Amino acid sequence: MAPSDVQDESQARANEETLTALVDEYSGAMYRVAYSVVRNATDAEDAVQEAFVRVLRHRDTLHEVRDYRVWLIRIVWNIVLDRKRRAKTRPETDDIADLARVLPATGLSAEARASAAQHHAKVLACVEQLPTKEREVLLLSAFEDLSSVEIAAVLEITESSVRSRLFRARNLMADLLHHSRSGQ
Amino acid sequence: MTFADRNANERMRAGLIADAEATLRLVASQPVPEGLEERMKAALKNAPRTGRVLAWPGSGGTRGWMQSTLVRTAAAAAIVFVVAGGGWGVYSHVKPAETARVIEMPKRVAAPGQFSSAGAMRTPNGTVPAPTSDVSKDEKDKPAGKSLKAKKPSRAKPGAIKSLPKR
């Protein structure tokens, strides 16, 4: 066996190991990011799988990646946004109602749980009314382990843009929630 | 609006934002389904290893003939040779169009005290087709010089007495 063959094989083995480690470490975070957009467990899992298949195709360039977490989240983020854009025909209201029902409300009475589900549904409906840029930043900001620098890297914008969009998103959310509350 | 009212409004808005963010955090902290990592690993094992479109033929794990650097270089050189040869063939068969022969006419400059040409342009003979239908058969038979003489318009007024020929 030629020395270059041995080197290639060891490189391939190292890439496989890196990929397995990435699956173990980041598939949970990727799933949550995907779920926050598609709001469906099966779709979110599909998106994560597609992201890893893409990574597999570029496994030879894995050593060039600086921050695996941000890189993987960006891949899955783009996949879910693309899927959501393509599946516009599906009504958003169904997803919101399902999600509001699923959200944890332990230690609450049945009445309080129903009220909490209603509140969650209202909030999620208001999030859907936000402009795309503001909505994206607000969704990613909910992930406590993502800093504004990392959000900027995922969205490929500057950190100051992240902060200004987040400010606008919060103000708009307050207005929307206030209107929906006073409209009742 | 008083300061107290504004303060209350601000507090109310902050509460609404906090509620909304709490909901989004709940969404973001959804439990990951059990066995997700194992399913991902299994999917990766079954997934195709290379992109289908740009993959070299025979590169699926085994080192095919196209993996050799020498063969690749030779193939690339052959492609360059064919493309360049084709380009040269086309270039050598196409002659560039000859440029039109243009004789520049000197600009007529009016001498001081004379009338200008008022932008009139001289049309060279031959650009306008000469009328042939007016020319009679007799004129055709005559020599060119005489014909021109006959065509020359008389300056004498109609009805004027012609001068007698000298003896």
Image (cartoon, rainbow, N blue to C red):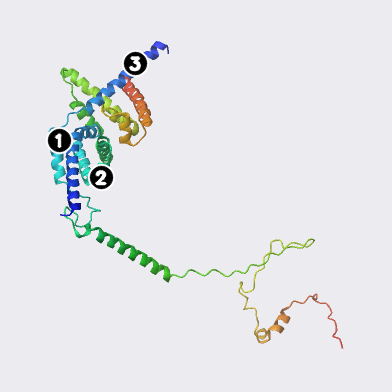
Residue in view at x 33 percent, y 16 percent: B12
Pick the residue in front: B59 or B14: B59
Say which quarter of the image contains residue B33: top left
Tell me which amino acid carries mark 2: Thr
Q: Are marks 1 and 2 in contact (CB under 8 Å)?
A: no
Circle 1 — which element?
A: helix
Split into 4 quadrants, where in the image is the N terminus of chain B? top left
Tell me which amino acid carries mark 1: Leu
Q: Which residue is mark 3?
A: B11
Pick the residue in front: A82 or A120: A82
- Check if mark 3 and mark 2 are on a common chain: no
Rendered image: mark on residue A61:
2
Say which quarter of the image contains residue B32: top left
Query: Chain letter of disc 3?
Result: B
- Where is residue A159 drawn, in percent x and y? 36, 31
Circle 2 — which element?
A: helix
Relative height, residue B58 to residue B104 (above, below): above
Q: Which residue is mark 1?
A: B36
Tell me which amino acid carries mark 3: Arg
For the residues labelled 1 and 3, the Cα–Cα distance comes to 42 Å
Residue in view at x 19 percent, y 33 percent: A28
Split into 4 quadrants, where in the image is the C terminus of chain B? bottom right
For the residues labelled 3 and 2, the Cα–Cα distance comes to 50 Å
- Where is residue A161 drawn, in percent x and y? 37, 31
Say which quarter of the image contains residue A39: top left
Q: N-terminal of the two: label 1 or label 3?
A: 3
Query: Chain letter of disc 1?
Result: B
Query: Chain letter of disc 2?
Result: A
